[in-house]
């Protein structure tokens, strides 16, 4: 199994409730195998103003071919006008990646 066939999707949310709702939908729809959720502090510029916000970072693991579907689903559920959704290809243990396959097919 090629490890470049998997990705980690990173999404920021404005609240833990929103993150939980998005995570539940992604797992229930088998778009991702799992989601890790953690509080973070974000600093960014939005509409010309420097913002300092408490946010929630979601890290989801899935097959690389599902990343676009994950982005589309998150965008349909997210409260932000422009949610931060990025992904990177990942490597991992064969056993873990096999479990990712089971959860996302």
Image (spheres, grey):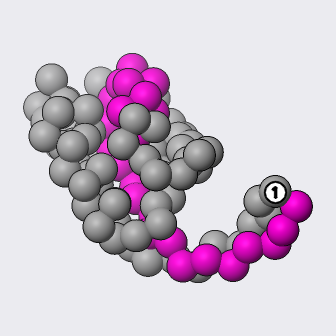
Quadrant of the frame with the C terminus: top left
Q: Is residue 73 magenta?
A: yes
Q: Secondary structure at mark 1?
A: loop
User: Where's residue 19, x and y in %?
Assistant: 34, 60
- Within the image, what quadrant is residue 65 found in? top left
User: Where's residue 59, x and y in %?
Assistant: 40, 55
- Within the image, what quadrant is residue 42 found in? bottom right
- Residue 67 appears in the picture as rendered: no
Q: Which residue in the protein does label 1 denote?
A: 47
5 sits left or right of 97 in the view: right
| 100 relative to 37, above or below | above
Q: Nearer the viewer, residue 69 or 94?
A: 69
| 104 relative to 47, above or below | above
**Magenta region: which residues?**
48-74
User: Where's residue 63, x and y in %?
Assistant: 33, 29
Q: Nearer the viewer, residue 34 or 3?
A: 34
């Amino acid at each position: 199994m090629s490890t470049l066939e998997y990705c980690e999707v990173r999404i920021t949310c404005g609240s833990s409730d929103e993150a939980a709702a998005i995570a539940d939908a992604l797992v229930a729809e088998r778009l991702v195998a799992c989601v890790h959720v953690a509080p973070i502090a974000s600093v960014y510029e939005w509409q010309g103003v420097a913002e300092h916000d408490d946010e929630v970072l979601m890290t989801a693991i899935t097959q690389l071919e599902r990343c676009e579907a994950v982005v589309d689903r998150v965008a349909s559920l997210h409260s932000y006008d422009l949610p931060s959704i990025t992904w990177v290809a990942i490597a991992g243990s064969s056993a873990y990646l096999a479990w990712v396959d089971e959860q996302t097919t």
